[in-house]
Amino acid sequence: MSDSKIGERAVYQPGASSIEGSPTKLQFFRAHPYIMSMPHWHAQVEVNYVISGTVHYRMGDHSLRLNAGQMCLFWGGQAHQMDESSPDSFYAGAHLPLIHFFRMRLPVAVSTMLVGGATMLTSVTDQSDDENFARWFRYVNSGDPLKAENAVEELLLRVERMFLEPYTVISSSAYAGETNDADGSPSVSVVRMCDFIAANFLDDIDATDIARSASLHPKYAMNLFRKSTGMTLIKYLTLLRLSRAQAMLIKDNDNILHVAMESGFGSVSAFNKAFRQVAGMSPSDFRRDMRSNSAV
């Protein structure tokens, strides 16, 4: 975090934590939410549960206000920014890589709506959520692998329960996409592909390599992944690389070529094109704007 003179409020700077730089890591958080100096993105599904106060998000095509007792789920691969956070706000949650997200049994089309930019919101929460999120945070940070695994399993079950109760889909363009199984469960092959991508996204891999990891024909693998997730194999691979690059641009002084290569891109032109599609600006402009905001 960094201190801003604007309104004497602390501001979250993208790249200040390992969220963006470690896009395949499952992370829990429990803290006062800081407003963000700029939109950021990360290749994980985000769970936010507001314990007190209120926060406001700007998403890709919609805005969202969360009050105490509300919980939401959204895809962090869309640029998003928390632009309001009341002084008494406190929240908890987690960043779920797709490998964990696909372990859940969710209704048909939920994953495709999320990746398509929708936010799932519920007000069906109670005191047990306050206690559970606090315990999960302690367990994950305890250093005990058994406690950490228990916290993850319980969180996944809690997110599943969100869709057994009334919930709201917020987006001007949310849609119900197709899934490969009638019950909405992802294919084991998709989980294997996500696992392979997570382990190798910084290397020179392509759709053929990813398909081979699940013993599938490339064309079938690409169709299966898109039906299950709502995005292409290459888009997911690119988002992991961009998330890593975003953190490097903030933390390091390496030139753009080095950032591109270290993030898994084969050329500066490919890196610039992909970065503009997500950030709406070039990598160099993003670095300049971030550092200008940090200096305010």
Image (cartoon, rainbow, N blue to C red):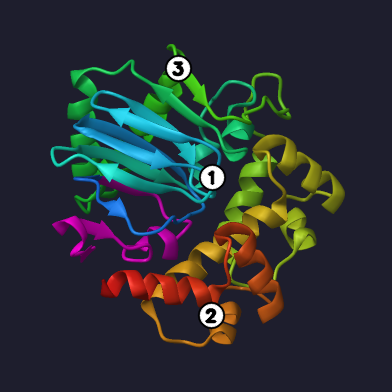
Q: Nearer the viewer, residue 267 or 55?
A: 55
Sequence order check: which comes first, mark 2 or mark 1?
A: 1
Q: Nearer the viewer, residue 267 or 84?
A: 84
Quadrant in the picture for the C terminus = bottom left
* Amino acid on which disc 3 is placed: Tyr
- Residue appearing at x 23%, y 26% in the figure: 68
SS for callout 1: helix
Q: Give the magenta-colored segment's residue range.
A: 1-29
Could you say where residue 2 lies in the image, as x and y percent from the top left? Answer: 22, 66
Alpha carbon distance from label 3 to label 1: 21 Å
- Residue appearing at x 24%, y 46% in the figure: 33
Q: Is residue 194 magenta?
A: no
Query: Residue beneath label 3, please?
Result: 167
4 in relation to 98, above or below:
below
- Using residue 118 as the reference point, say whether residue 157 is left or right of it: left
Sequence order check: which comes first, mark 3 or mark 2?
A: 3
Query: Residue beneath label 1, please?
Result: 98
42 in relation to 85, above or below:
below
SS for callout 2: helix
Q: For mark 2, does the 10 Å Cα neighbourhood hold few (<14), some (14 to 19), or many (20 or more) residues?
A: many
SS for callout 3: loop
Could you say where residue 180 lies in the image, as x and y percent from the top left? Answer: 73, 29
Alpha carbon distance from label 2 to label 1: 24 Å
Sequence order check: which comes first, mark 3 or mark 1?
A: 1
Name which quarter of the figure residue 87 lies in: top left
Query: Residue beneath label 2, please?
Result: 259
